[in-house]
Amino acid sequence: MILSADTIDDGSELPCDLCIVGAGAAGITLALQFLRSGLRVILLEGGGWKPDATTQSLYEGVVAEPDLHPPTDRYRQRRMGGTTTVWSGRCIPFDSIDFSPRPWLAHSGWPISYDDVACWYPAANALCEAGACEFSATAALPGGMRPTIRSFDPEGFALDGIERFSPPTDFGARYRAKLAASGDVRVLLGANAIELVTGPEGATVRRIEVATIAGRRFAVAAGRVVVATGGIETPRLLLASRRHAEAGIGNHHRLVGRYYMCHIAGTIGAVTLNVPRDYVWNGYEKAEDGAYCRRRWTLDAATQREHGLANGLLRLHFPAIPDPRHGSGPLSALYLAKPLFSYERAKRLQNRGGGAGALLHHLRNVVTEPVATAGFFMHGVRHRVFSARKYPSVIVRSPGNLFSLDYHGEQVPNPDSRVSLGRETDALGLPRVTVDWRHSPVDIRTAETALSLFDAALRRWGRGRLDYDPALVAHHMLRDGAYGGHHIGTARMSATPTSGVVDTECRVHGMHNLYLAGAAVFPTSSQANPTLTVVALTLRLADRLKRDFATARAA
């Protein structure tokens, strides 16, 4: 059942067994596990089905370093489906080393093992609709996937890993019918949770205070509560719930909002390959199940240990789009069309020098390659605009074997990188957030070392070269700031209350009935996009809750 929160009587209190706050990937995944449970489940979503400027403005906040982090209302989506309404669909599991304590990385290690999460990846991959749960290039396609560069085997990198792509699945639209048909799950749209109210003892959430933009107020009283509102909004709600906890719920040790991570990412350098064109493949291949797959080079575990690095990967990428010297009509056309792109993509196409001369050079590239440019956009219309399973991203071969390198790396946990409450409040009276995102030296050193290792491997191979300025790696990695919507680690999982916010079951330390779902609980960020692991960890939480409810029924 799906209803507007404005249909709920003002001042009423709705009883339920389970209340889920937030209907993004985590919240919807959790709700789907209780469709025919016989339990009373309420799923609260602050937005509706479509973007709404007034609702979205509730995400506005302050960023300490605007050059390093996007505005807090960008990329995040306050509507049914959450950020899955705009994600790229990239699905990658974490690596085993991500869960292990790494003596060379402070605050690393999960209190659960890789296997505790990995067993849920197949079901998570199915919900994300990314095809078979097979992340080996050798096994993903019959006969294996073609190598990125034939006969090139860079030392220090794992070569067999791939990323798979969801269509991408908008969880709200995709699972709307199932939620609407359920008699056990009630979805309330436009229902903004503004406070978790505990009893005076502070160990049990008695009710969730809810408000609508239209001014209606009511409460939900639940046996168990799961907050699944993302890495920024989750600490906001916990910190703002101060009725019986001066510092906020779960914040006895002042850790809520700390260890805020995104990813370190950037495109750098010029890779020139002296091999036939068919030796190089930097695009996607389609598996038999229809999912697009792509190779990448990942720093292997031994290299991370030897050099004291975080996790990270490199992909072969087309030349930098803003630099017209690539000579590519399609790339120049993309640059000229940047006003049509989303915030996250458009900011990476900003002109970084060159002025009117560069603009004329871009125009000349388009005129010089009219057939290639037209074919590229026809491919985009056919395979991205009108295809149910969209081609994941731009793939262009520039004249000659000229490429750049795309780096995507783990950001290590840093307690000084944090989300906190500001002094201003939103239209519902909730304090707005202040984001102080900070990177660490090892984040940049990992990128520097990955590039250095790749450069050395090319030199040994003798059939290509990487031209880049090692002194400018930090500039390129931080030029566009924190990466997109990967908001991670602000309510980290830990074995003890003194080192984190939730326990191994995602229950807030010291609380009887409050759980958190989503990337906020990740102790580390890996090299991987977080969505697949968010869904897997949520399925694990659902299993635990089901067993708890079954035990309570049997008692």
Image (cartoon, rainbow, N blue to C red):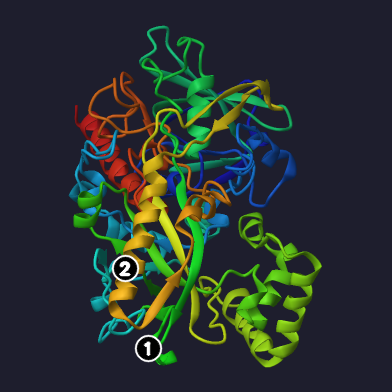
Residue 279, image x and y in percent?
Answer: 37, 88
- In the rendered view, does 285 fall on the left or right side of 57? left
- In the rendered view, does 445 fall on the left or right side of 55? left
Name the one closer to the observer, 46 or 477: 477
Q: Quadrant of the C terminus?
A: top left
Name the one closer to the observer, 322 or 169: 322
For residue 444, above or below residue 492: below
Alpha carbon distance from label 1 to label 2? 20 Å
Circle 1 or circle 2, nearest the eye: 2
Can residue 92 be seen in the rendering of this structure?
Answer: yes
For residue 24, above or below residue 545: below
In the picture, the disc for residue 279 is: 1
Residue 531, image x and y in percent?
Answer: 42, 53
In the picture, the disc for residue 254 is: none
Residue 29, image x and y in percent?
Answer: 41, 49
The answer to which of marks 1 and 2 sits earlier in the sequence is: 1
Q: How crowded is mark 2: few (under 14 residues within 10 Å), some or many (20 or more)?
A: some
Name the one closer to the observer, 337 or 521: 337
Q: Is mark 1 on a helix, strand or loop?
A: helix
Which amino acid, mark 1? Tyr
Q: How crowded is mark 1: few (under 14 residues within 10 Å), some or many (20 or more)?
A: some
Which amino acid, mark 2? Ala
For residue 494, above or below residue 199: below
Residue 503, image x and y in percent?
Answer: 27, 30
- In the rendered view, does 252 fall on the left or right side of 5? left
Name the residue rendered at 39%, 54% in the picture: 448
Name the residue rendered at 28%, 75% in the picture: 460
For label 2, the residue is 456
Location of residue 103 (image quadrant): top left
Residue extending furthest toward the top: 200
State yes or no: discs 1 and 2 in contact (Cβ < 8 Å).
Answer: no
